[in-house]
């Protein structure tokens, strides 16, 4: 039974990060759009593996960053240079991974045939284009519309 409880705690951690961290919401939404748009590209199995590992890495790094920030805030609510250094390093690690994820995305999605396929699909299916625009607006509200709970 404790094995299943571990999954419950892990999902609680994921939900907590999504609810309380704007960057986590951004990365989650970006991952969903990347997976939707990937269908327009002729990705190999290895490309999909790279894409999934990249997404998982960025989201995991964001969660580690959140855990470190929360722990630092609990241990030392007042300013301390070592706490600042720890939080800055954790945030820097996420930034490095996100930059390399973006470069990976540009490499994978930089195929003109895939971009044209996506363009042609949305131009010839105005309902899907409308749904895409509506989902982008709702995603924007999801990302920036929530306020972090005060501690």
Image (cartoon, rainbow, N blue to C red):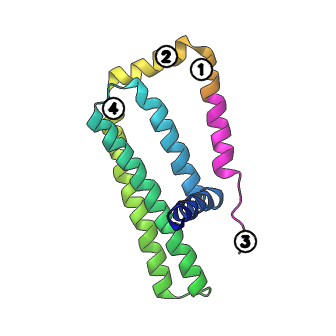
Q: Nearer the viewer, residue 49 or 147?
A: 49
Residue at image coords 32%, 25%: 42
Residue at image coords 55%, 56%: 23
Q: Quadrant of the C terminus?
A: bottom right
Q: Name the residue carrying label 2.
A: 121
Cα distance, mark 4 to mark 2?
Answer: 17 Å
User: What is the chief secondary structure element of the magenta stretch?
Assistant: helix
Image location of residue 145, percent across then percent down? 71, 51
Q: Which mark is residue 150?
A: 3
Q: Is residue 5 above or below residue 135?
A: below
- The secondary structure type at the circle numbered 3 is loop
Q: Which residues are magenta?
A: 133-151
N-term mark: 1 or 4: 4
N-term mark: 3 or 1: 1
Do callouts 1 and 2 mark residues in contact (Cβ within 8 Å)? yes
Q: Name the residue carrying label 4.
A: 110
Q: Is residue 112 above or below residue 46?
A: above
Cα distance, mark 1 to mark 2?
Answer: 8 Å
| Crowd rating for badge 4 (residues with CA inside 10 Å; few <14, some 14–19, many 20+) | few
Do callouts 1 and 4 mark residues in contact (Cβ within 8 Å)? no
Instruction: Please tell me in which quadrant of the rendered image residue 71 appears.
Output: bottom right
Cα distance, mark 3 to mark 1?
Answer: 39 Å
């Amino acid at each position: 039974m404790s094995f299943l409880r571990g999954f419950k705690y892990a999902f609680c951690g994921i939900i907590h990060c999504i609810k309380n961290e704007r960057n986590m919401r951004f990365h989650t939404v970006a991952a969903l759009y990347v997976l939707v748009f990937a269908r327009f590209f002729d990705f190999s199995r290895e490309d999909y593996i790279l894409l999934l590992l990249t997404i998982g890495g960025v989201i995991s790094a964001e969660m580690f960053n959140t855990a470190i920030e929360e722990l630092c805030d609990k241990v030392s609510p007042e300013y301390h240079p070592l706490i600042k250094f720890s939080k800055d390093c954790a945030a820097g690690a996420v930034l490095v991974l996100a930059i390399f994820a973006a470069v990976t995305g540009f490499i994978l999605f930089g195929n003109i045939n895939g971009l044209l396929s996506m363009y042609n699909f949305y131009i010839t299916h105005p309902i899907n284009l409308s749904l895409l625009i509506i989902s982008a607006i709702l995603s924007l509200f999801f990302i920036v519309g929530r306020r972090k709970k005060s501690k």
